[in-house]
Image (cartoon, rainbow, N blue to C red):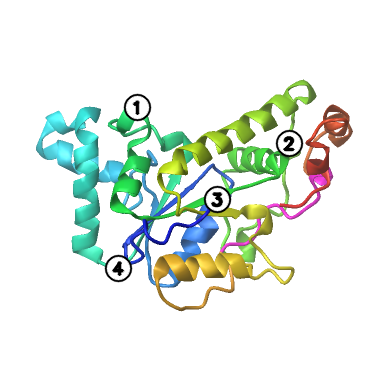
Amino acid sequence: MRGDAMAINQDSDLIFIFGRQRSGTTVFRELLAQNGALNCDEILHGDLSRPFRFYQFVAEAAARDPALIHPQHHAALFRRYIEALRAEHGGKLAMDVKYFALNLIPGGLGGGPFLIDYAAAQRAHVVLILRRNKLRMIVSERLAQATGRWSADRPERLLAKKPKVELAPERIVAEIEALQRMDRVVLEMLGKTPWAEVLYYDEMFAANGDFSKQVQGVARKVLGRGGDFRRPRNLKMNPEALSDLIAAPEEIAAALRDTAHGWMLEGGG
C-alpha cells in the first residue's frame, strides 16, 4: 500500500496494528513496546483480565451507568477510552486489532468498521500484517488452540512435544482461500488509510533471526524515533517443517497438488 505523507499525521500517538490471529501482530506490538510504546494488547479481546483493553473500560463505565452496555454507545466510549489512555500513560499507544473484532463497534460509515474510519479520521499510524503461507497459519492456530500456548518469550515456554494437527484434505483449499479473501477485504477497507504500512510475516525476519530492515524501518517510522529494533522478544513457536506437524501430510500434499497453494507445504513463514 503506497504511503501518502500528506495524509498521515506523522506525530500521531495512535498505532493500529491490524491482522488475523497467527499473522505476526503480537511480535510487532512487542517490538514497539520494547521501544517505549504502551502495549495496549488486543484491545477488543473479550478477556478482561489484561489491562488497557477496551471492553474492560466499557465494563467499568457500565458499572457506573448500565445504559452504556448497549453497543450504540461504544463508538463514543472508544473515544473516551483513547483519551483515558492518553491521560494516564501518554506516549505512543500500540493497539492490536484482529480481523474478528473489526465489526464489534458499530458506527462506521456505510456500515464499515468503525475502527478503520476512526483511524482514518485521526490520521493515525496503521500497520497491516499479513501471512502469505496460509497453511502454516492454519496449523499454527490449531496447535495454539490445542495446547493453549500462543506465544513464548523464552525457550522453556516452547512446547517440547506437540500433537499432530488433523486437517481435512477435502476442505483445506477452501480454508486457505477463505483466509486469502479476508486479507483482500481488509486491504480494500484500508483504502481509507492509503498511508498504511503492509508487512508480511513470511518476510519479517532475517536469516539470523533479527527483524528485517523493513520491519525495523516501519517500527522507527511509527514511533518517530530511533531505538533497538533488531531482536524479537517472542520466539518462533513452530519452526519445524509442516510435514512434521501435520497428521497426514501426504494427503494434504495431494489435495494441494495442481493448485496455486502447493508451495505452502514446503514453504517457510
Q: Earlier in the sequence, mark 2 or mark 4?
A: 4
Q: Give the range drawn in magenta.
A: 234-244
Please state the horizontal and vertical placement of residue 178, each as a whole percent of the image. 63, 29
Image: 186 above or below 31: above
Residue placed under numbered mark 3 in the picture: 129
Please state the horizontal and vertical placement of residue 241, each as a whole percent of the image. 81, 50
Amino acid type at image mark 1: Gly
Q: Nearer the viewer, mark 4 or mark 1?
A: 1
Label 2 sits on a secondary structure element that is loop
Asked whether disc 1 touches disc 3, contact meaning CB atoms under 8 Å apart, the reply is no
Q: Nearer the viewer, residue 128 or 105?
A: 128
Asked whether disc 3 touches disc 2, contact meaning CB atoms under 8 Å apart, the reply is no
Asked whether disc 3 touches disc 4, contact meaning CB atoms under 8 Å apart, the reply is no
Residue placed under numbered mark 2 in the picture: 165
Residue placed under numbered mark 4 in the picture: 91
Give the alpha-carbon distance from disc 3 to disc 4, as whole Å.
23 Å
**Measuring 24% from the left and 57% from the top, which residue is drawn there?**
85
Q: Earlier in the sequence, mark 1 or mark 2?
A: 1
Q: Nearer the viewer, mark 2 or mark 4?
A: 4
Give the alpha-carbon distance from disc 3 to disc 2, as whole Å.
24 Å
Image: 74 above or below 133: above
Left or right: residue 184 compared with residue 97:
right
Q: Residues within 10 Å of mark 1 (few under 14, many from 20)?
A: few
Where residue 113 sits, quadrant-wise, is top left
Q: Earlier in the sequence, mark 1 or mark 3?
A: 1
Residue placed under numbered mark 1 in the picture: 111
Q: Residues within 10 Å of mark 2 (few under 14, many from 20)?
A: many
In the image, is residue 238 part of the stretch drawn in magenta?
yes
Amino acid type at image mark 2: Val
Left or right: residue 204 compared with residue 226:
right
**Measuring 20% from the left and 55% from the top, which residue is drawn there?**
83
